[in-house]
Amino acid sequence: MNNKTLEKIISDTQSDPYVKWNDESLTNIITNSVEFSCYLFNKDGNHGYFSLLHNLTSNIDGVIVELGNREGLGILSIYDALQPTSEFYTLDIVNDNRFVTDKIKNDSRVHILNDFNSLDIDRIEKTFKKKSISMIFLDTIHTYEQVLEEFKLWEPYMKDDCVMLIDDIRPCMPGRTKWRFHTELDYTYKYDVTEWAHNDTGYGVYLK
């Protein structure tokens, strides 16, 4: 993805940070009575990044990777916009995708791997080709050390124009130190979209 396209997607999402669902049935399990509905539908005005995930995915033809998928809200947002020739790998070490439907699980484009440690270099090498990932979202343990190691291991598998997404990039609470990675990262294009995407802990978008 080139920077002009990325900037337009960010700008369009900022002006209307709500997912425009292609398949409303995917969200039937999440109702007004479910705590997580306020996040997915951005009812609290603090979770516009689900719309950003959706809008970016609709513009990507390639491999998309999500590191950390608990509850499965990100999976829903990405899947609804997943292009016919794209592949989606979503990884975790905890098997809690409570909102993911059988339709998603049975789609050949989707690989839900909840026994996959994001720092397992041997498995990364066996699963992905170098320079193959078009978008990656780093959302596992919220520490500087974790995200730095993930970046080192996964960067060789990212395309030169890969879009990288990272949450918790602002100092927000004790123990959450990913903001240090955001500060140090030497990328040509760095976008802090915290105010409308995730204004309690921060959200960053990056392109080399």
Image: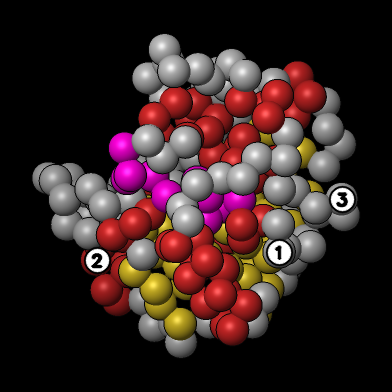
Q: Is residue 140 above or below residue 156?
A: above
Q: Quadrant of the N terminus?
A: bottom right
Measure how far apart labels 1 and 2 are at the Cα level.
Answer: 29 Å
The span shown in magenta is 44-54
Q: Identify residue type, mark 1.
A: Asn
In the displayed image of the protein, which residue is found farthest to the bottom? 188
Q: Identify residue type, mark 2.
A: Arg
Which sits in the foreground, 194 or 8?
A: 8
In-image side of 182 versus 42 (left or right): left
In-image side of 196 versus 133 (left or right): left
Residue 41 lies, in percent from the top left, at: 47, 36
The quadrant where residue 78 appears? top right
Q: What residue sits right under mark 2 in the picture?
A: 180
In the displayed image of the protein, which residue is found farthest to the left? 174
User: Which one is earlier in the sequence, the residue at label 1 or at label 2?
Assistant: 1
Q: Is residue 50 magenta?
A: yes
Q: Is residue 30 above or below residue 51?
A: above
Q: Secondary structure at mark 2?
A: helix
Q: What residue sits right under mark 3 in the picture?
A: 84
User: Which one is earlier in the sequence, the residue at label 3 or at label 2?
Assistant: 3
Q: Give residue 59's mark.
A: 1
Measure how far apart labels 3 and 2 are at the Cα level.
Answer: 37 Å
Q: Is residue 77 above or below residue 8?
A: above
Which sits in the foreground, 140 or 122?
A: 140
Asked if the residue at tag 2 contacts the one at tag 3, i.e. Cβ–Cβ closer than 8 Å, the answer is: no
